[in-house]
Amino acid sequence: MGVAQVTGGALWWGPAAWDIARPYNRRMRILLSNDDGYQAPGLVALARALAEFAEVDVVAPEHNNSAKSNALTLNAPLYVHRAAPGVRYVNGTPADCVHIALTGLLDYRPDLVVSGINNGANMGDDTIYSGTVGAAMEGYLFGIPGIAFSLAEKGWAHLDTAVALAAELVRTLQPAVEAHRRASAEASHDAAHPGPWLLNVNIPNLPREQVRGFKVARLGRRHAAEPVITQVNPRGETMYWIGAAGPAKDDAEGTDFHATRLGYASITPLQIDLTDHARLGYWAQTAAALSAALGATTHPGGVRVAATGEAPRPW
Ligand code: MN
């Protein structure tokens, strides 16, 4: 990213310039990460399957980084080690891995960022905490399509099924990935190619013949997490363990919980605008009331909070 360049009379941005200059006679290039660590069976198996039809570079955390969401490490140096050709690991978070890969480690711009396959579900509220989703989302934030894959139950009982389905989905999406790459390189996003997309996919833990297919689903909701667990360490100090995620609260038809329970792999397109659009009007009224209250004491030097009387409380 960075410097605008003039190529053939058109204005391009950095990576796009050499991307579009290159004919698309190569295989799709995938950056693969996860949050369970670079040695996790879900990543290793998926890397092998994707490599059958794509160029795959793995940049993944050295250790388990589940529930790290989009965290970036800002207060410690990050080191990249090479485990095998095309496989690197980092002493950081999933988002660190993708961030580093896209901002200097890789000498090309991947066409797709894939994350997973995670050891366990990432449905409903899980997506807020999930490092698996965080890795894919980091690519999405950089304008690259992303897919986060999770096995709906822990353990790798039917990892082979999940890998086959995940690879098939990626293979099927190749035209969409290519369409995005071209629209991005030509700066020609339109209604048909509005920008990068981000998919959250949960695959049921079932033998292949019992999986009923893919189903698009919205996120469900979980109940509040289980209580924190306290223990006493050998020095008499109390330790706290974050409790398990709660069971499903909203698992109605149309949700990811519902689809996977019926034996479908759920596909949820995600976005990152957290704005509560439905309540913008309500809060606009509150903001107007607050402004009116402040108006009496506003002076040319700026806004000063009323010295007397209470400001309106929105709760
Ligand atoms: Mn994980």
Image (cartoon, helix red, strand yellow):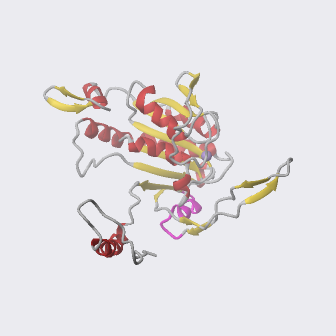
Please name whichever residue, 22 or 209, is drawn nearer the observer in this view of the structure: 22
Occupied quadrant, residue 40: top right
Q: Is residue 294 above or below residue 215?
A: below
Occupied quadrant, residue 111: top left
Which residue is outermost to the bottom? 309
In the image, residue 139 lies in the stretch drawn in magenta: no
Which percent across, then down, holds residue 66?
61, 46
User: At x 52% / y 64%, what residue is drawn?
Assistant: 220
Q: Which residues are magenta?
A: 252-264
User: At x 47% / y 32%, what residue is drawn?
Assistant: 100
Which percent across, then down, holds residue 19?
30, 28
* Quadrant where the image shows the N terminus: top left
Which residue is outermost to the left? 9
User: At x 67% / y 50%, what residue is drawn?
Assistant: 154
> Is residue 27 toward the left or the right of residue 71 in the image?
left
Please name whichever residue, 290 or 104, is drawn nearer the observer in this view of the structure: 290
Please name whichever residue, 126 or 80, is drawn nearer the observer in this view of the structure: 80
* Residue 169 visible in the shown view: no
> Is residue 213 toward the left or the right of residue 204 in the image?
left
* Residue 177 visible in the shown view: yes
Occupied quadrant, residue 222: bottom right
Which percent across, then down, holds residue 143?
35, 41
